[in-house]
Image (cartoon, rainbow, N blue to C red):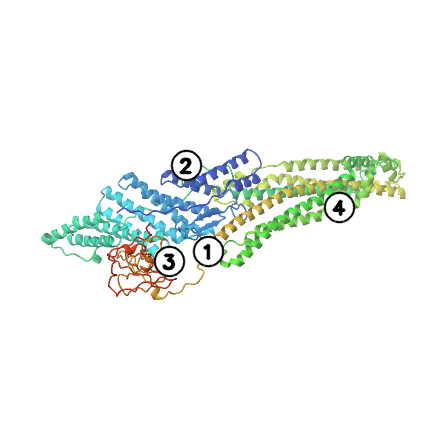
Amino acid sequence: MATFISVPLKKSSEVDLVKPLSKYVTAAYPAGEEQGEHVRAVEELHKLRRSALGRPLDKHESSLEILLRYYDQLSAVEAKFPFSENQLCLTFTWKDAFDKGSLFGGSVKLSLASLGYEKTCVLFNCAALASQIAAEQNIDNDECLKAAAKYYQLASGAFSHIKDTVLSALNREPTMDICPETVGTLSLIMLAQAQEVFFLKATSDKMKDAVIAKLANQAADFYGDAFKQCQYKDNLPKYFYFQEVLPVLAAKHCIMQANAELHQSILAKQKKRFGEEIGRLQHAAELVKTVASRYDEYVSVKDLTDKINRALTAAKKDNDFIYHDRVPEIKDLEPIGKAALVKATAITPPLSQKFTDLFEKMVPMAVQQSMSVYGQRKAETVNRLVGTMREATNLCNGVLASLNLPAALEDLSGDSIPQSIAEKARSIVEQGGLQSIEQLIRDLPELLTRNREILDESLKMLDDEETTDNELRSKFNQRWNRTPSGDLYKPLRAEGGNFRNILDKAVQADQVVKDRYSTHCDMIALLCKPENELNAAIPSANPTKTLQGSEVVNVLRSQLAQLEEMKKERETLEGEIKAVTFDMSSTFLTALAQDGAISEEQLSLSHLDKLYGSYNQRVQATIRTQEELLGQVQTSHQEFSSLKQSNTESNQREDILKKLASAHDSYVEISNNLREGTKFYNDLTEILLKFQNKCSDIVFARKTERDELLKELQQSIAREPSAPSFSVPAYQSTPAAAAPGPTPAPRTVFQPQQQPQPKPQPPSRPPPPTFTPQAASMTPASPAPSGPPQPVAPAAQGPPYPSYQGYPGYYQMPMGYNPYAYGQYNMPNMPYMPYQTPPGQGGYPGAPPAGQPYPGYPQQPPQQQPYYPQQ
């Protein structure tokens, strides 16, 4: 009776996990011990996949443990790598578990760049292997029954989980084996079998008949639901698997209901309801009789039938002679209760007891993304504070240069070079003078061109692949059912457009620096000359020497000293701001663990405010101090200027000194800008190379997917008929008699259904021909077992393969017929017929009247021929 249903495994193609995952690790994590650990974990993951999917699995718990470990690892790693078609693209290919393929092509398979698809298929295999292990258990052993119930419930839970998640995990139409209708049906089947196992255990433990009856009735209900699910889904019966499962489900439904009625009859007997006992036993006998007549080849019910019949005979005998109780109709009997002791196991990773996360030290992608955004916010905060201080310093330098300070205080003699101008000249010479700036300016176009070439090449790869995809889509129309490249590349194109905007802005900034250099180039060149030439280029003047010891000069010098001290404080403050570090990963991990999500903006802004709030106050304080000091310096300089003697020479000298001071400040700023620009282009080159690798990887993955899809389309096109079907004349074919298939039990939970007809049985394949003139003349025809004689058939022009009933070209031939008739003229009672027909086509003698045998042929009763040709 215990015939259990198991599910076949899906098969997967080999996938290289090491190369793409290792490439991502080396790009995302700095070289060191942490990177090495992640690379080793990637290799272990690849080995685990090969162990789980790259070899046949035994029907043993250890094999299931490997599959569960791989599924758990996929669940853990899903959040730590950016698996998607436009980021880390890994294409997984799986075959349909139930489709066995055809002569002209392999079985149906689907390739997707989705880790969710891989997880779904692996979980399907976990459920399938669990069903196979459960079906192998010894039902006579108590521990084996417990194991079988556990595995069936696990399989039911896994199939149910796939039903709920497959559409969202794939975002496209799945293969039929993992579609919601199929896995939903399989989940019901597994749950019914788990309930049946509990019924068997209760029977083995000799529990109360009332309990056993409820368990059996519940199992019958589960089997009925599974049968209805199979019956009412048009796409399921096309599988040969479900064609064999369907009668088993119908038989199990009847058997479980019969067991429920049997044990309930025992309960009725105990309560002295003898008529009810007989009624229930009669219903049980009808149910097992239905199973024996329709599903005997699938399930044996001999023992149960004998048990029910013995009980029914004894009950009738006792009732006829002793009790004379009225036997009620089955519809009038009280319904048997139900007791469901099984439920689908919830799929909550980790499912394996031996699971260890290979990437335990790698933070989830949500944390990585939050860290990236936090890093941008931190950089913006630092740049804002440092930029504010630098702008204030430049403003201060500009104001002092416009006032010719501190050179005006040092140039009271009117003939020598002011000390500050001499120091600025030496500083420019030490930094390389004009040559260093001109070299930096010459390098910028080359760096810009390199970055543009990398960006253009990256986008060209996307354009070429998208063009190919659009051409194939227009050629195959709806058959080209993969994600359009235009939709897939939108994030990459947006990223590329952002890089192009950055380059355009960088070009504008370069031009601003070049224009500024052109403005101050002459004065910078003058500062680079020797001291005597510099002194000769500065006009002389004769100001009043009495100003050297005046109070105005001392006050002005004190104010300038305070400004210099403030600039040094800003340099120190800038270093402190840049040195601030804090690891936000722990904060984000805690938020993710507590809330299941990360509010990055709120956490980042509050933390940055704590880190840089005090520095922001200090920056603002230096700006206020500078404003006060510059106001005082301007007032003091007005007094100083009014004391100086005004003449043309002194004005020219002061004007030159102002330009020299401004040229020094411009030289320093231009040098810094050019070096920052050079660093910017070099850093951008690394970023663009990563972008290029990302584009290259996705284009390669798309090419692999395209080639796979093209191969499948070619196979499907080859399997399609080259011409539409047409009707064959009646005289060329003899339709096979329709064989009735098994129908489900007469139960109210489902309607009877005509089962698929058995395949026609073809004749044996004849031996190869050996034509001789004598044999050609002795080729009689034989009549069909019934009906009018068959028409004369022309000589075979191709290989002598047998034809099948129901197909064009089929002719019913009796046993013993030899289409080549070699050696038949030696048979007894066989008259020799000389060759009379013209050459080119051998004729057949006319058929005898209907119902009369051919003379000379031994007659044999009709036999059932085997399905496959016998060698």
Q: Which residue is mark 3?
A: 234
Tell me which amino acid carries mark 1.
Answer: Ala
Of circles 3 and 1, the one toward us is 1
Q: Secondary structure at mark 2?
A: loop
Q: Nearer the viewer, residue 396 or 72?
A: 72
- Which badge, 4 or 1, comes first in the chain's sequence? 4
Above or below residue 838? Residue 173 is above
Give the Cα separation between the discs numbered 2 and 4.
66 Å
Q: Which residue is mark 4?
A: 514
Tell me which amino acid carries mark 3.
Answer: Asp
Q: Measuring from the top left, give residue 411's x and y in whole percent.
A: 85, 37
Of circles 3 and 4, the one toward us is 3
- Which badge, 2 or 4, comes first in the chain's sequence? 2
Q: Which residue is mark 2?
A: 354
- Which badge, 3 or 4, comes first in the chain's sequence? 3
Q: Secondary structure at mark 3?
A: loop
Above or below residue 594? Residue 865 is below
The mark found on residue 718 in the picture is 1
- Contact flag, marks 3 and 4 (Cβ < 8 Å): no
Q: Nearer the viewer, residue 550 or 372?
A: 372
Tell me which amino acid carries mark 4.
Answer: Lys
